[in-house]
């Protein structure tokens, strides 16, 4: 789950990181009022879950409240990478001397939190890392000990030469680690971490992603979820207890078990197709879950064929078959569906499905090949 900048800043502030004040507005009039309260120049910032807002015109400096209103009018409702801006953050403008990058994320390969720091901040860190790798430093934290004081100092020393800046930054590095750990984050980032002309270090942008598996024990973080800014299909899937990730292909996949779902996607590619999604319906034969899965898959207009791949173990194939039949009777689907079921009670399941007019298979290769072929044929017909 991604947090908005204003939410990540709340977490940062709570950890003690110096962050300028700010308030959220949903109308231009509100933005003007907030700007008036602060007086002087402010920055109006789109609150969307997307990087590169600045480049897209979603971050604008305003010299006074009138200009803040005008900027908010333009930014609210703006489309940034497919997301509509519904809120703006209004925050007093800072005088900037330098911009650095400071982030911490869970490095999956190292299985540990890893800090990333660069004095070349403000811009896209991936570009800096690629084009000028010598300007980036990494530091892995052993989760058994947490971030050690000398490690925070080492990062601060890499970023700055001035003792005053180093002292403030050492503290900020430790506070960022606290915010990251205490929020159950998979990523926390300050870009840019600025220095002001009078020698202060501050975070003027904030980004944070929370590990979904951490949410159940952190209701204060969990309630920050903004469903209006995530794809509708993902909200539905979460509410239905399905794990779903949208992809760009045209073969809708509905599979029980995450491992089998991954293998199915690989096989779709092997046969020259492209999966439209990852979807694990879990061990359930509950028709409601199958209905939800089908509604989510078919809400993607790119889907040209639907592939079920079910491996029956404790889950009985005939139960799942009944679930699929019930579900497809409840909703209208105008793309072909092919189904593979194998394992416990597969014979009974195949009878049920064939009786209801479905193409049913026991071979994974055959069904995937057929799904890819059908998706191609449907796509050609509708082109
Ligand atoms: P992003 O583009 O979504 O990462 O948004 P940021 O909040 O990082 O802002 C982008 C850039 O706008 C920063 O790197 C700064 O150069 C500039 N900027 C943002 N806030 C301020 C501010 O308060 N004062 C000044 N002078 N520039 C700012
Ligand atoms: Mn930024």
Image (spheres, rainbow, N blue to C red):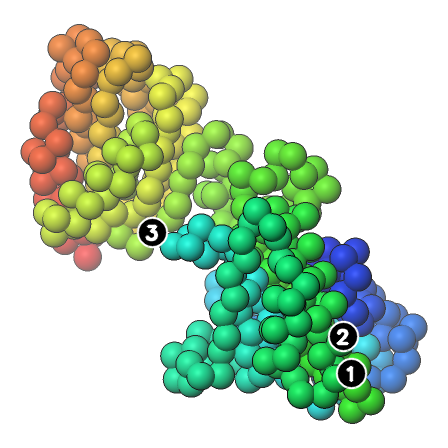
Q: Closer to us: mark 2 or mark 3? A: 2
Q: Residues within 10 Å of mark 1 (few under 14, many from 20)?
A: few
Determine which of the numbered discs, if any, sits on residue 173 in the image.
Answer: none
Residue 153, percent from left and from top? 66, 72
Mark-to-mark CA distance, 2 and 1: 7 Å
Image quarter of the C terminus: bottom left
Q: CA distance from mark 1 to mark 3?
A: 48 Å
In the orientation shown, which residue stands out farthest toward the front? 150
CB of mark 2 near ligand 1 (< 8 Å) = no
332 left or right, relative to 172: left
Q: Is residue 271 above or below residue 200?
A: above
- Secondary structure under tag 2 reads helix
10 Å crowding of disc 2: few (<14), some (14-19), many (20+): some
Q: Is residue 315 visible?
A: yes
31 lies left or right of 126:
right
The residue drawn where x is 71% and y is 74% is 169
Q: Is residue 2 visible?
A: no
Q: Quadrant of residue 127?
A: bottom left
Q: CB of residue at label 1: within 8 Å of ligand 1?
A: no
Q: Are marks 2 and 1 in contact (CB under 8 Å)?
A: yes
**Viewer-side residue, 146 vs 100:** 146
Determine the secondary structure under disc 3: loop
Whether residue 285 is situated above or below residue 9 in the rendered picture: above
In the picture of the structure, the residue carrying the numbered disc 3 is: 247
Q: Point out which mark residue 164 bears.
A: 1
Q: Is mark 3 within 8 Å of ligand 1?
A: no
Q: Pointer 2: what residue?
A: 168
């Amino acid at each position: 789950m991604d947090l908005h900048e204003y939410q990540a800043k709340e977490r940062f502030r709570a950890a003690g990181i110096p962050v300028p004040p700010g308030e959220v507005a949903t109308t231009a009039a509100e933005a003007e009022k907030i700007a008036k309260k602060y007086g002087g120049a402010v920055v109006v910032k789109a609150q969307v879950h997307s990087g590169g807002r600045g480049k897209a015109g979603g971050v604008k400096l305003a010299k006074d409240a009138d200009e803040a209103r005008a900027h908010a009018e333009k930014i609210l409702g703006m489309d940034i990478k497919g997301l509509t801006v519904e809120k703006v953050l209004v925050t007093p403008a800072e005088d900037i001397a330098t911009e650095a990058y400071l982030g911490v994320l869970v490095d999956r390969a190292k299985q540990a939190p890893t800090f990333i720091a660069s004095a070349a901040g403000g811009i896209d860190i991936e570009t800096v890392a690629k084009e000028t790798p010598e300007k980036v430093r990494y530091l892995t934290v052993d989760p058994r000990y947490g971030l050690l004081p000398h490690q925070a100092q080492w990062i601060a020393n890499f970023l700055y030469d001035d003792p005053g800046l180093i002292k403030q930054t050492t503290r900020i590095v430790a506070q960022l680690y606290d915010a990251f750990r205490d929020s159950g984050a998979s990523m926390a980032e300050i870009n840019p971490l600025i220095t002001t002309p009078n020698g202060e270090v501050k975070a003027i942008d904030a980004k944070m992603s929370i590990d979904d598996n951490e949410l159940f024990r952190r209701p204060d973080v969990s309630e920050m979820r903004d469903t209006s800014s995530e794809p509708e299909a993902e909200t539905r899937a979460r509410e239905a207890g399905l794990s779903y990730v949208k992809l760009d292909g045209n073969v809708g996949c509905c599979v029980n078990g995450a491992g089998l779902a991954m293998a199915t996607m690989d096989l779709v590619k092997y046969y020259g197709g492209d999966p439209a999604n990852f979807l694990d319906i879990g061990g359930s034969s509950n028709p409601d879950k199958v209905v939800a899965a089908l509604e989510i898959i078919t809400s993607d207009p790119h889907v040209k064929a639907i592939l079920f791949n079910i491996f029956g173990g404790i889950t009985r194939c005939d139960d799942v078959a009944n679930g699929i039949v019930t579900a497809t009777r409840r909703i209208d689907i105008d793309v072909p569906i092919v189904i593979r079921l194998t394992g416990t009670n597969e014979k009974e399941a195949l009878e049920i499905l064939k009786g209801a007019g479905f193409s049913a298979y026991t071979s994974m290769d055959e069904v995937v090949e057929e799904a890819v072929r059908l998706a191609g044929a449907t796509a050609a017909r509708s082109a």
